[in-house]
Amino acid sequence: MPPRNPVLFLALLGLFPGSPLHAGNIEIIDPFARASRPGAPTGAIFMSIRNTGASADRLVAARSPAAAMVQIHTHVEDGGIMKMREVEAGIQLPSGATHALSRGGDHVMLMGVTQELVDGETVPLTLVFEIAGEVVIEVPVDNARGQPTGGTGQ
């Protein structure tokens, strides 16, 4: 269910673009979600993750009630074709480093979407880190953001 006042809700969570959400030594920067197309069974979530701690950490899992399955994905070349693959070992976050989850690279993949990703609404997401533990965020849906000129989809 979308919040009654999404702008106020996002402001309170610090999720306006460029405003990081702090959780321990982890900062979640500029998260947003996209559906591959209206009514699609999949969607993707993008953001930057900064580790401000003195020790390395690792993003090991993600989950959301908005999808039957959530995986951390990357793109790999296979026979000259780019394909998405699950990153089973998670994403390493060295101390002081920022890792971008972006189109065409690493991202959070929503599969079996149970809640349509509607522009202006939010998607609940829990990111699970090896050291920092769980970070719960509300991700704004912005299907136009990051869209290549003339393209559609992920």
Image: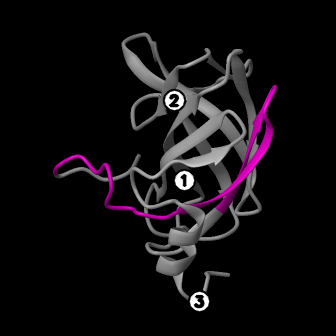
Indicate whether residue 7 is drawn in magenta.
no
Residue found 51% across the figure and 29% down from its top: 106
Locate residue 37: give its quadrant: bottom left
Give, as a three-letter code, the residue at label 2. Answer: Asp
Mark closer to the observer (3, 1): 3
For disc 3, the marked residue is 4
Residue 43: image tag: 1
Circle 2 residue: 106
Q: Secondary structure at mark 3?
A: loop
Q: Which residue is more in the foreground, 99 or 70?
A: 99
Distance in Å between CA atoms under marks 2 and 3: 32 Å
Mark 2, Cα crowd under 10 Å, few <14 / some 14-19 / many 20+, is: many
45 and 35: which is toward the camera: 45
Q: Nearer the viewer, mark 2 or mark 1?
A: 2
Q: Which portion, as a residue range, is magenta?
A: 124-149
Mark closer to the chain start, 2 or 3: 3
Front disc: 2 or 3: 3
The CA distance from mark 2 to mark 1 is: 13 Å
Which amino acid lies under the numbered mark 3 shown in the image of this protein?
Arg
Q: Nearer the viewer, residue 144 or 47?
A: 47
Q: Residue at x 17, y 49 (%)?
A: 149
